[in-house]
Image (spheres, rainbow, N blue to C red):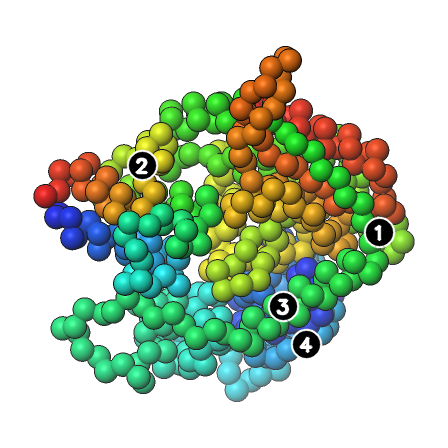
Amino acid sequence: MIEFKMPALGSDMTEGKLLEWKVKQGDAVKRGDVIAVVDTSKAAVEVEIWQAGTVQELLTEPGTTVPVGTVIATLAAPGEAVAAPEKRPEKPAEERPQPRRRISPAARKHAEDRGVDLDKVEGTGPGGSVTVEDVERAAKRPVVEEKPAVKPLPEKKAPPVSDRALEMRKAIAAAMARSKREIPHYYLSQSVPLARATEWLEAENARRPITERVLMAVLQLKAVALACMKFPDMNGFFRDGAFVPGPSVHAGVAISLRQGGLVAPAIHDAQELPLPELMRSLADLVRRARAGSLRSSEMSDPTITITNLGEGGVETVFPIIYPPQVAIVGFGTIARRAWILDNDIRLVPMVSVSLGADHRVSDGHRGALFLAEIARLLQEPEKL
Amino acid sequence: MNKTEVRTAVLAELTRIAPEVEAGELAAERPLRDQVDLDSMDWLNFLVALHEHLKVEIPEADYQKLGTLQQVVDYIAAKLGAP
């Protein structure tokens, strides 16, 4: 029998609320199937299963909060007999009075936040599914009289969802306090000229339609991922007193959320993705992070984090490791600066790349070589 | 499509990407990214949305001409031949 437990979707998560089951008793599941939606303090997350089997019993009711590690469902392994699903004779699955409603995880989360009763929301999405907009409409219904003739005003900013913001702040605080308490950080930074990368990218983007343009952040991400292949001691986890190298480079990307807070979900196997594909993955990840629909594997397994704070003009980031990872790379703003090249002072686009790494795993010398490798890779953008 | 309609369409895309924006509070002549929290990804998504919904080509070399809301509206209106 397979016990399916409430997963830890990030090291800062201690409990999770089951929002929805995506499977029912007797369903066959395969590796990678989404079987439930769990609400963490950060987002509604689609939880995948990593073993094949047949759902035997769903032990936790939607709406219940349970600690991480609690068995929330049992499954029969392939070949194992499934216990007779006779437990609920009053309601066989096929004879449910109503077909199950399709509600997007983001809409469900939205409804939770706004206190909207989903049973009373009319679905207008594909196949009658309930969308965020439907919830939004339902949330406003009691206050706003429906007057179709009047053009709706630009949507008013929702009141701050203080509970969620508070929960997220607590989760971030717990992870960062643990990081500062347990991880002996060292910090390094290096100025990296981006003249070649900028020129190359401009020429590439000029050739591409707008929908396929690539951001400099994607080149930076790829350079870090490739450098991790040469420096496995920057990529992995510190667990139970020892370093465990990551199986691949699952690049965690720090994404700030509009309502405050941040998440750092992973782009899997980032070292293998060509730039356009990496760009699509990043765009998709940012969109889903902000819509609150991330997957459990993205939340739980980044092997290193990359944070880009250049947008606001930050020169150098002093990044704090997200445990149990062992390194984090920060990029500052790209700005033209005076730089000496061949005994000449030139104006060159520069970026400061910084590293926060775990002294239990590596030393400054290794960190310096790692940064130098990132800098080197960024000088050959066509090879990224 | 006239200029007012272009402006409405631009604001619609902007508020889709940055829902916290109050369209009425934007100063049309001030740099947009000083008033709205848009990172490079948001900015690109904004331009892609304009490209897709209004069918205008926006080469990357033109990004620097698109500093303010007014400049964005004028640029697109010119491309569409809007009065």
Q: Amino acid at mark 3?
A: Arg
- Which mark is in front, 4 or 3? 3
Q: Residue at x 36, y 78 (%)?
A: A139
Rendered location of residue A307, percent (x, y)? 62, 47
User: Does dot 3 land on a helix, a strand or a loop?
Assistant: helix
Distance from the alpha carbon under mark 2 to that under mark 4: 53 Å
Single out the residue that lies furthest toward the right: A241
Question: Residue A193 is drawn in which quadrant?
Answer: top right
Q: Amino acid at mark 1?
A: Pro
Q: Are marks 3 and 1 on the same chain?
A: yes
Q: Is the residue marked by circle 3 packed among few (<14), some (14-19), or many (20+) residues within 10 Å?
A: some
Above or below residue A272? Residue A117 is below
Point out the tag, 4 or 3, that comes first from the N-terminus: 4
Q: Amino acid at mark 4?
A: Val
Location of mark 1 (residue): A184
Question: Residue A3 is drawn in which quadrant?
Answer: bottom right
Whether tag 4 and tag 3 are in contact, CB under 8 A, the answer is no
Distance from the alpha carbon under mark 4 to that under mark 3: 20 Å
Report the disc number at residue B65: 2
Label 4 resides on the chain identified as A
